Amino acid sequence: LPNATETIIFVTANARALRHFIELRGSEWAETEIRKVALQVLRIMQREAPSIFGDYRIERLPDGTEVARTEFEKV
């Protein structure tokens, strides 16, 4: 949006789609901006659905950015 206009969005997704998004966009290979979004989604989902998203851990990279990691990829 122009001039950094604040916008409220509403997103729907199932658990599998959210896990896929977090795995792709929360990785160290993703752009920093989308990675921040993925990690915020992960934090919300860990709070709201810990049995589904509790296997993820957030790790800090040497450059100070964070990534999402899990042992159970492609669920």
Image (spheres, rainbow, N blue to C red):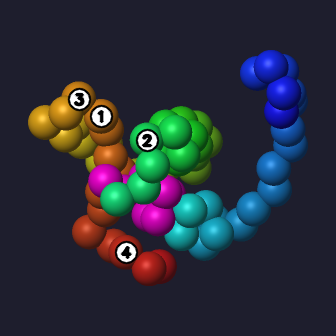
Real-space Cα distance between discs 3 and 4? 24 Å
Q: Magenta span has 37?
A: no
- Asked whether the viewer can see residue 56, the reply is no
Query: Given the image, on which type of amino acid does mark 2 rest?
Result: Thr
Q: Quadrant of residue 6?
A: top right
User: Residue 63, position in %: x, y?
Assistant: 19, 33
Q: Of the residues under marks 2 and 3, which one precedes in the sequence?
A: 2
Mark 1 falls on what kind of element? loop
Real-space Cα distance between discs 3 and 1? 4 Å
Q: Is residue 18 above or below residue 73?
A: above
Q: Residue furthest front?
A: 2
User: Residue 56, position in %: x, y?
Assistant: 36, 54
Q: Is residue 34 above or below residue 3?
A: below
Q: Dot 2: within a 10 Å radius of its alpha carbon, few (fewer than 14), some, or many (20 or more) residues? A: some
Residue closer to the observer: 12 or 34: 34
Residue closer to the observer: 63 or 72: 63
Real-space Cα distance between discs 4 and 2? 21 Å
Are circles 3 and 4 on residues that touch, CB within 8 Å? no
What is the span of residues highlighted in magenta in the rendered image? Answer: 22-28
Q: Dot 1: within a 10 Å radius of its alpha carbon, few (fewer than 14), some, or many (20 or more) residues? A: few
Q: Of the residues under marks 2 and 1, which one precedes in the sequence?
A: 2
Query: Given the image, on which type of amino acid does mark 1 rest?
Result: Thr
Residue on which disc 1 sits: 65
Residue on which disc 4 sits: 73
Real-space Cα distance between discs 1 and 4? 21 Å
Residue on which disc 3 sits: 64
Mark 3 falls on what kind of element? loop
The residue at the point 52 percent across, 39 percent down is: 33
Q: Is residue 8 left or right of residue 4?
A: right
Tell me, for residue 32, which label it has, or none: 2
